[in-house]
Image (spheres, helix red, strand yellow):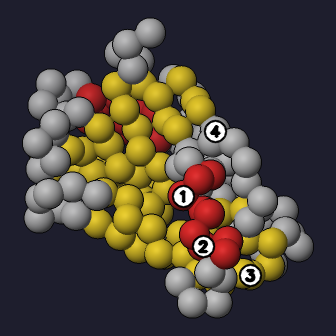
Amino acid sequence: MTYQITGISPETLEPHRRAAGSTAIRVTATSKPGFPCRVSLEDAEKGEEMLLFHHVSHDVESPYHSSYAIYARSDAKKSAHYIDEIPPVFKGRPLGMRAFGSDAMLKTAGLAMPGDADKTIRQLFELDEVAYIDVHNAAHGCFVARVERFDP
């Protein structure tokens, strides 16, 4: 079973870049790790400018519609793309993994401790009804990235 993880589109940031101060704020990363970019799927370097904005991560017609505040580099230009590989923002953090079916309904969930993300993803995808997994930081609850089945 092969999977892919892709950062959010940099186009998602455009309205927030222009409206910073109302729907988004500009912040400076004060530590690494601590400011995970959802476009590059890497932690920002200390001193980097970030956007903190409200993001709808699970934009579906189901009770599981979900959104929360997330960070992204203010100058992010290209989405990261990983195949059968864990991005840097998954490493060193406990992660909540919500496994959804093609009907946008939650089928099951898992908790991956640091170092266990790949194993947990593969276990969740053993269930045929799981179409994709939304990964969240376990402590703060914010969306990190979506994991999808991939057929090369």
How far is mark 1 from mark 4, CA to CA? Answer: 14 Å
How far is mark 2 from mark 3, CA to CA? Answer: 13 Å
Q: In the rendered structure, which amino acid carries the disc numbered 2?
A: His
N-terminal-most mark, 4 or 3? 3
How far is mark 2 from mark 4, CA to CA? Answer: 20 Å
Is 31 on the left-hand or right-hand side of 21? right
Question: On the image, numbered disc 4 is attached to which residue?
Answer: 80
The answer to whether any part of residue 118 appears in the image is yes
N-terminal-most mark, 1 or 4? 1
N-terminal-most mark, 3 or 1? 1
In the displayed structure, 146 sits above or below 81; it is: below
Q: In the rendered structure, which amino acid carries the disc numbered 4?
A: Ala
- Label pair 2/3, CB-CB below 8 angstroms: no
How far is mark 3 from mark 1, CA to CA? Answer: 18 Å
Q: Which mark is residue 27?
A: 3
Question: On the image, numbered disc 1 is attached to which residue?
Answer: 12
Q: Residues within 10 Å of mark 3 (few under 14, many from 20)?
A: some
Question: On the image, numbered disc 2 is attached to which residue?
Answer: 16
N-terminal-most mark, 2 or 4? 2
